[in-house]
Image: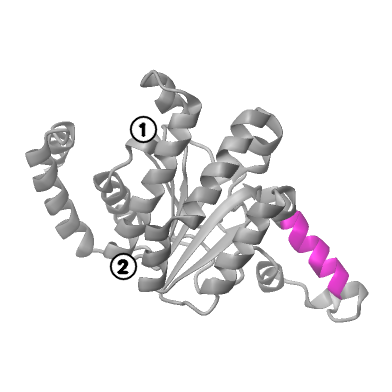
Amino acid sequence: MKLLWRLLYKLSRNILVLRIYESLLIRQVKEGEIPRHVALILDGNRRWATRMGLSPKDGHKAGADRVKDLLSWCQDLGISTLTVYAFSTENLRRRSREEIEHIFSLFEQYLKDPHLRKEIDKHKVKVKIMGRLDLLPSRIIDLIKEIENKTKNYDKFFFNIAFAYGGRAEIVDAVKRIVHEVSEGHLDVDAIDEKIIAKHLYTSHLPHPDPDMVLRTSGEERLSNFLLWQVAYSELVFLDVMWPEFRRIDLLRAIRTYQKRRRRFGG
């Protein structure tokens, strides 16, 4: 059976075989436990562009378009929360000003996209942008506030975009808020525990803040400062696929891998 699956995957560039393979995968995956919260590290945009003889801008554009498909695939499978790592605080410091401005522009276009907005309203998607938002241009901050306010009462699906985000920065911000509450007399030091810390993280609004599965594309096998607190017991899946090339069958393969794991949660 394993050999058959491997053969189908190798042949999946053929459209007919792709449809057959995808149909079989969907049937198999839906018989198992679907992760409630899936988090993705969207890696490989620039390397894909280089391989295709394109510019980094083209890679980022292709990656942004793929996220729209991902949102739809997750909803169809019954996943209730999706968190994507789109742009890190390290990217903000180390990328060229030209590339950063292009990413900002793409992000702005993405959040304004009429089709995306229509889907968000149709499926009652609560949108949350997580990160050091004060580092972003005012026009982006205003747009974030607008879409978050518009979707604040939606609760059928939760879509989180980690942008200008760092896992260590998130924990630092949580600690600062806790210290402030202690200094104001609203919180006793002895009352601080894991639940209190989790309550002050960017993911505190979620019904399932800890991802069941973390998926990274591009073949790299590290977390790169993503959701460091929340992924303590997450299942990690790494795929050797550049993000712009990511297909629904790749998501299905990752979920199938997740379903084969025995989750012990430290037990």
Q: Between residue 65 and residue 156, name the one nearer to us.
A: 65
| Highlighted range, magenta | 171-181
Residue placed most toward the observer, 152 or 206:
152
Q: Kindly indicate the quadrant of the structure image that contains residue 183.
A: bottom right
Picture residue at 54% right of the left edge, 73% below the top: 150
- Is 222 in the magenta? no
By secondary structure, the bulk of the magenta-drawn segment is best described as: helix
In the displayed structure, would residue 81 be above or below residue 47? Answer: below
Residue drawn where x is 32% and y is 59% of the image: 72
* Marks 2/1: CA–CA distance: 25 Å
Q: Quadrant of the N terminus?
A: top left
**Residue at the disc numbered 2:** 78
Q: Looking at the picture, how far across and down is residue 30, in whole percent?
A: 21, 63
Whether the magenta-drawn stretch holds residue 179 is answered as yes
Identified by mark 1, the residue type is: Asp
Q: Is residue 191 above or below residue 47?
A: below
Report helix, strand or loop for mark 1. loop
Q: Quadrant of residue 54?
A: top left
Image coordinates for residue 202, horizontal then vertical, percent: 64, 63
Mark 2: secondary structure = loop
Question: Looking at the picture, which amino acid does disc 2 mark?
Answer: Gly
Q: Position of residue 179 (x, y in %)?
A: 86, 67
Circles 2 and 1, Cβ within 8 Å, touching? The answer is no
Is residue 44 visible to the viewer in this orientation of the structure? Answer: no
